[in-house]
Structures are given as C-alpha cells and as structure tokens.
Image (cartoon, rainbow, N blue to C red):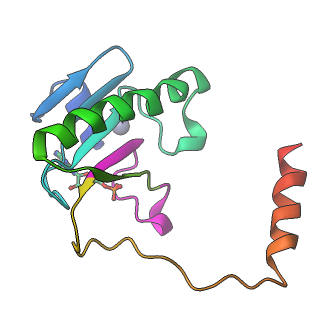
C-alpha cells in the first residue's frame, strides 16, 4: 500500500528483513530493535493500521500463529515466559501504522517496560464495564 509504510515494503520484499515465517496472510521477522533476544514481529501482509481494521478472517488466524511462533521462539532462546503485545495507535505506542504483534520472550527480573497500572477506582469500574457491555450489543 503506502510507499512510506516500512512493513508494506518488507511484506512486498522491497526492503530486507530477517524472516522466520510467511504465508498468504502474514509474515514474521526479527524486530530490528529487540526488547529481548528472540523478539519477533508477526505482521499482516495487507496494510491494516489497527486491530479494529483487520478483517476477521485474517485476525482469527493471528493468535494461533502467534502461539506457534512463540513456542518455537521460546525453544530457540531457552525461555518459558513471553508477552504478546499489539499497540494500536500513537497513544498506545504504535510507531509503525501497519498491524503487527510483538512476540517478546521474558526472563527473570528483566526490566522490560510492561508494568501493572494503579489500583482501579471501584466506584467507576462498574460504569465503564456497563458501557462496554452496551457497546457490544
Ligand atoms: P510499534 O511501536 O508497536 O509500532 O513497534 C514497531 C516495531 O517495529 C519496533 O519494535 C521496531 O523496532 C520495529 N521495526 C521498525 N522497522 C523495522 C524493520 N525495518 N525491521 C524490523 N523491525 C522493525
Ligand atoms: Zn503497510
């Protein structure tokens, strides 16, 4: 799609990447700035900015594929725990506006910036939950 989209360029073979997997819908390659050894990106072949833009038929396959890639990655780097992360939009830290899932092996006491939030405001939580339930209908 966009000339300026680095993942479209990679998906179409116009710029190099260190690939570990590809099929009609996805490619997976090593992140060039890894948070940990084995950090992979699972990327849709088509240009979809956010999870909400990806067609269901493609998205349905993503988690199964991430599971398979994560298992192979963990074996390869001798780790057991990992994060699957999808950043959606700039406020969520998405730098490349083309759907991708990070597969990030973790190790004991590493200092990756994935922290728990502050305790919930229990007076507000039920109202937010109710709004979500309404919007699911
Ligand atoms: P995000 O903040 O979720 O958009 O993450 C984008 C990720 O893409 C970052 O972890 C970058 O290191 C990675 N990245 C950007 N360009 C490349 C590239 N050419 N090859 C591999 N990884 C890349
Ligand atoms: Zn793209």
Image location of residue 39, percent across then percent down: 20, 50
Residue located 27% across and 71% down the image: 112
Magenta includes 90?
Answer: yes
Magenta includes 40?
Answer: no
Whether residue 3 is visible, yes or no, is: no
Quarter of the image with the C terminus is: top right
Residue located 58% across and 27% down the image: 55
Tell me where the magenta segment starts and ends, as one range.
Answer: 88-104
Name the one closer to the observer, 20 or 9.
20
- Ligand 2 - quadrant of the structure image: top left
- Answer left or right for 78 relative to 44: left
Residue located 17% across and 59% down the image: 36
Name the one closer to the observer, 1 or 111.
111
**Rendered image quadrant of residue 124:** bottom right
Residue located 21% across and 63% down the image: 107
Image location of residue 122, percent across then percent down: 79, 83
Image location of residue 31, percent across then percent down: 18, 48
- Answer left or right for 13 relative to 57: left
């Amino acid at each position: 799609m966009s000339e300026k989209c680095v993942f479209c360029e990679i998906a179409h073979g116009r710029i190099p990447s260190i690939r570990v997997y590809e099929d009609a819908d996805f490619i997976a390659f090593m992140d060039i700035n890894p948070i940990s050894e084995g950090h992979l990106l699972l990327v849709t072949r088509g240009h979809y900015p956010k999870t909400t833009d990806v067609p269901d038929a493609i998205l349905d396959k993503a988690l199964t594929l991430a599971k398979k890639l994560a298992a192979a990655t963990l074996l390869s780097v001798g780790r057991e725990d990992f994060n699957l992360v999808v950043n959606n939009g700039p406020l969520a830290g998405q730098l490349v506006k083309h759907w991708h899932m990070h597969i990030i092996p973790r190790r004991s006491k590493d200092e990756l910036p994935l922290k728990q939030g502050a305790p919930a405001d229990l007076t507000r939580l039920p109202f937010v939950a109710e709004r979500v339930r309404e919007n699911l209908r």
